[in-house]
Amino acid sequence: MGKLKLRARDSFTAKMFLSSLLVSLLVLFPPVVSADDDDEIDTEIDWEGRFTQVVDIKTEPLANYLRKDKHQFDNLVLARVSSQSPKEKNSKKYEVIWYRKGDPIGVRRLNGLAFQAPQRIALHVLHSSLPASDDDVKSAANACLRLYLELYAKTMSPSAIVVPKQSFNSFVQRMNQLNFYSAEEPEPNTPVRTSIILSVESEPPGLRQLLFYSGSGL
C-alpha cells in the first residue's frame, strides 16, 4: 500500500514538472505566426490611390542596330517614355531616347507632357525582358533623372520611382554611382542637407530605398 502511494505521488510530481516545463518553453519560444495570419501584405501597388499620373519608362535592347559599326553603335538600348492617368488609363507617348552603355546618344520628342501641376507622379520603370541587362538598368536610371529635371522645371517632382523587383538592387547601385547615396528616412524635425530626395520602390512591393543627392553630377 505504501509503495502504491509513493508511485502515485511520484507520478503526480512528474506530471507537474512536465506541465511547468511546457509553460516555460511556450514563454521562451512562442508559436511562430506567419505574417499572413495577422498582417495583410500588399502584393500590388495601389496606383489609383497613390498617384494621379504615371510616367512609364520602358527599355528595350536593340541588338545589331547598326551591324558591325566601327563606333560600337550595334548594341543600343531604346527607352520609350509615355504617361497615363491610372484612372483613365489613356497612355500618351512623350519621347524615345537611344542609349549606348547608359549614356543618351539621341532623343526624339513626340509630344509635350500631357499633364500640369499639381500632380502625384510615379516614374514607372519597365523592361522588355527580365532579368534586365546592365545597360537597360543604366538607361532607365538616366531616363528617370532626365524626367526628374523636366518635372522640376514645371514645379513638379515624382513621389516615387517604381522599378521591377529583379532590377531593384542594380538600379539603386547605379543611382549611387550617379552621386545619390542610400540612407534611412531621417527622424522628424531633422534637417537634411540635400537638394534632391528620391524614393525608389519595387514592383511587386517589398523593397524601398531613399536616395539623397550628394554631388553635382547631374
Image (cartoon, rainbow, N blue to C red):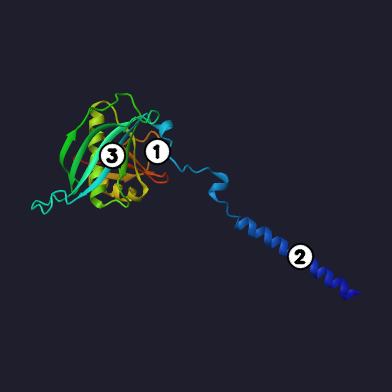
In 3D space, how far apart are the residues under numbered discs 1 and 3 (Cα atoms)? 32 Å
Q: In the displayed structure, does residue 172 sit left or right of residue 26?
A: left
Quadrant of res 185? top left
Foreground: disc 1 or disc 3: 3
In 3D space, how far apart are the residues under numbered discs 1 and 2 (Cα atoms)? 53 Å
Q: In the displayed structure, does residue 17 sit left or right of residue 1?
A: left
Confirm or deny contact between disc 1 and disc 2 (CB under 8 A): no
> Which numbered marker is on residue 187?
1
What element does badge 3 sit on?
strand
In 3D space, how far apart are the residues under numbered discs 3 and 2 (Cα atoms)? 67 Å
Q: What's the amino acid at mark 3?
A: Ile
Nearest to the observer: residue 140 or residue 148: 140
Query: Along the polypeptide, which appears first: circle 3 or circle 2?
Result: 2
| Mark 2 lies on residue | 15
| Mark 3 lies on residue | 57
Quadrant of res 79? top left
Quadrant of res 59? top left
Nearest to the observer: residue 37 or residue 125: 125
Foreground: disc 3 or disc 2: 3
Q: What's the amino acid at mark 2?
A: Lys
- In the image, is residue 164 above or below residue 54? below
Foreground: disc 1 or disc 2: 2
